Image (cartoon, rainbow, N blue to C red):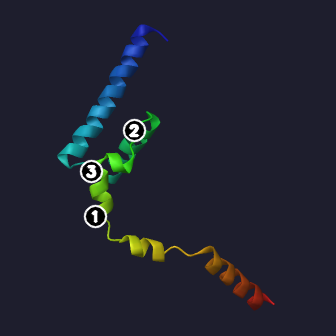
Amino acid sequence: MTDSLQDLLAKLHEAVGNELLQRIISGEATSADLSVATKFLKDNGINIDVEDSPPIMNLVKSLPFSDDQKESNRPSPKTLVEVFEEDAKKAE
């Protein structure tokens, strides 16, 4: 790849990142913009642990679920087996 093409791609990459950032900061970002920004970060290997990010932790804390609710909504394997057994009995 030529230096001029690399420079062009670097500028394009920076422009896309800056545009997405400005939309998010201004509050004008659509759900599509946020999806593109998420993919942009993922494609560029940008990841962070939830515990290392106060904004992400705040988002998690603001979700309308408690730890007890999350656990109670998860079916146990035994419950799934019972459901399959019941279905098998009904099919007989």
Residue 19 seen by the camera: yes
Q: In the image, residue 57 lies at what x, y percent?
A: 30, 55
Q: Which residue is mark 2?
A: 41
- Of 49 and 32, nearer the camera is 49
Element under disc 3: helix
Foreground tag (1 vs 2): 1
- Of 67 and 17, nearer the camera is 67
Say the numbered circle drawn on residue 88: none
Q: Quadrant of the C terminus?
A: bottom right
Q: In the image, residue 50 lies at what x, y percent?
A: 37, 50
Q: Is residue 85 above or below residue 31?
A: below
Specify which label sits upstream in the sequence, 1 or 2: 2
* Res. 46 image quadrant: top left
Q: Amino acid at mark 2?
A: Leu
Tell me the CA gap for discs 2 and 3.
16 Å
Residue 30 seen by the camera: no
Label 3 neighbourhood size at 10 Å, few (<14), some (14-19), many (20+)?
A: few
- Of 22 and 62, nearer the camera is 62
Label 2 neighbourhood size at 10 Å, few (<14), some (14-19), many (20+)?
A: few
Foreground tag (2 vs 3): 3
Say the numbered circle drawn on residue 62: 1
Label 1 neighbourhood size at 10 Å, few (<14), some (14-19), many (20+)?
A: few
Q: Is residue 80 above or below residue 40?
A: below
Image point 46% across, 9% down: which residue? 2
* Res. 41 image quadrant: top left
Q: Which residue is mark 3?
A: 55
